[in-house]
């Protein structure tokens, strides 16, 4: 089973070089150092989460087709 992972840099000085790893189909988020660290953390999180669901006889969601898109917001709207 495959799940999409959306990676995003953590924008906090004490976490420089870290990335958030979002797994939208499961509504899970973790983080790790660098892209590889974030992906490893996501793998570990999803495997543990799926094992827990299975242990309790709960269904595990599968992912349908994923799309990532962006929208643009005018800079003027973002200024205080």
Image: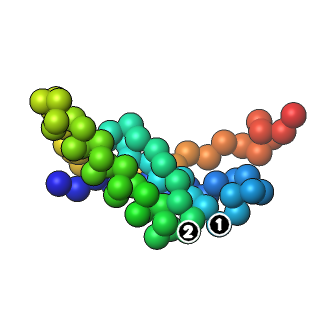
Residue 64: name its quadrant.
top left
Quarter assignment of residue 63: top left
Q: How many marks?
A: 2
Viewer-nearest residue: 8 or 39: 39
Task: Decide: is 36 above or below 2.
Answer: below
Q: Quadrant of the N terminus?
A: bottom left
The residue beneath circle 1 is 17
Residue at (16, 38) in percent of width and height: 54
Residue 18, compared with residue 77, is above or below; it is: below
Q: CA distance from mark 1 to mark 2?
A: 6 Å
Q: Position of residue 6 (x, y in %)?
A: 44, 54
In the rendered image, residue 73, in percent from the top left (x then y), is placed at 66, 42
Instruction: Tell me where residue 36 appears, x and y as whole percent.
Output: 46, 70
Q: Residue 17 location, x and y as percent?
A: 65, 66
Q: Are marks 1 and 2 in contact (CB under 8 Å)?
A: yes
SS type, badge 2: helix
Q: Is residue 66 visible?
A: no
As helix, strand or loop, the secondary structure at mark 1 comes to loop
Residue in the foreground of this view, choosing between 4 and 66: 4
Q: Name the quadrant of the C terminus.
A: top right
Checking the image for residue 78, the label placed there is none
In depth, the one of 26 and 73 nearer the eye is 26
Q: Pointer 2: what residue?
A: 34
Label 2: few (<14), some (14–19) or many (≥20) C-alpha neighbours in 10 Å? some
In the image, 27 versus 72, the foreground residue is: 27
């Amino acid at each position: 089973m495959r799940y999409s992972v959306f990676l995003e840099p953590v924008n906090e000085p004490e976490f420089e070089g870290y990335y958030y790893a979002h797994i939208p189909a499961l509504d899970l988020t973790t983080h790790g150092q660098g892209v590889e660290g974030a992906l490893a953390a996501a793998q570990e999180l999803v495997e543990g989460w799926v094992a827990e669901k299975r242990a309790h006889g709960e269904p595990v969601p599968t992912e349908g087709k994923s799309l990532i898109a962006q929208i643009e917001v005018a800079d003027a709207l973002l200024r205080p």
